[in-house]
Image: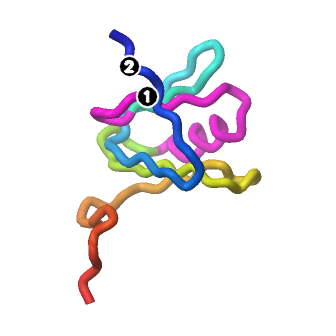
């Protein structure tokens, strides 16, 4: 059974282990381990950002993809350090 694609609202982030990127006739699709695929139409600024930012990321690397409300940069992509807590408290 095909999983529905994940959508992100403004300032929502999805974090997971990168499993690869694929293209079909109309979309770029990002696969993150244990999460529904994330897809954007080919030719969109989101698709261009994902292709550029994830080009050199190795499979299994933990990444975060954040949807912003900035027209010039609608997605922010980051590599998550393995010892970095997600939303956790920082040591003082």
Q: Secondary structure at mark 1?
A: loop
Is 41 magenta? The answer is yes
In front here: 70 or 10? 10
* Residue closest to the far top: 1
Q: Quadrant of the C terminus?
A: bottom left
The residue under the point 42% across, 46% down is 14
Q: Secondary structure at mark 2?
A: loop
Residue 10: give its label. Answer: none
Where is residue 79 shown, x and y percent of the image?
A: 41, 55
Compared across the picture, whether 18 is left or right of 29 comes to left
Compared across the picture, whether 1 is left or right of 64 comes to left
The residue under the point 49% across, 48% down is 65
Residue where numbered disc 2 is placed: 3
Vertically, is 65 above or below 84?
above
Is 36 magenta? The answer is yes
The residue under the point 26% across, 59% down is 82
Q: Quadrant for residue 52, please give it.
A: top right
What range of the chain is rendered magenta? 32-56
Where is residue 70 shown, x and y percent of the image?
A: 71, 56
Residue 37: give its label. Answer: 1
The residue under the point 34% across, 44% down is 16
Where is residue 1 shown, x and y percent of the image?
A: 33, 9
Question: Which is more foreground, mark 1 or mark 2?
Answer: 2
Q: Are marks 1 and 2 in contact (CB under 8 Å)?
A: yes
Vertically, is 15 above or below 47?
below
Compared across the picture, whether 42 is left or right of 2 comes to right
Q: Badge 1: how crowded within 10 Å, few (<14), some, or many (20+)? A: some
Q: Quadrant for residue 23, please give it.
A: top right
């Amino acid at each position: 059974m095909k999983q529905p694609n994940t959508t992100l609202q403004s300032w929502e982030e999805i974090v997971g282990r990168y499993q690869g990127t694929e293209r079909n006739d109309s979309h770029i699709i990002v696969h993150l381990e244990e999460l529904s695929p994330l897809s954007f139409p080919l030719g969109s600024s989101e698709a261009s950002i994902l292709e550029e930012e994830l080009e050199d990321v190795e499979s299994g690397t933990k990444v975060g993809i954040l949807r912003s409300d900035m027209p010039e940069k609608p997605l922010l992509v980051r590599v998550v350090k393995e010892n970095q807590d997600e939303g956790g408290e920082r040591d003082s």
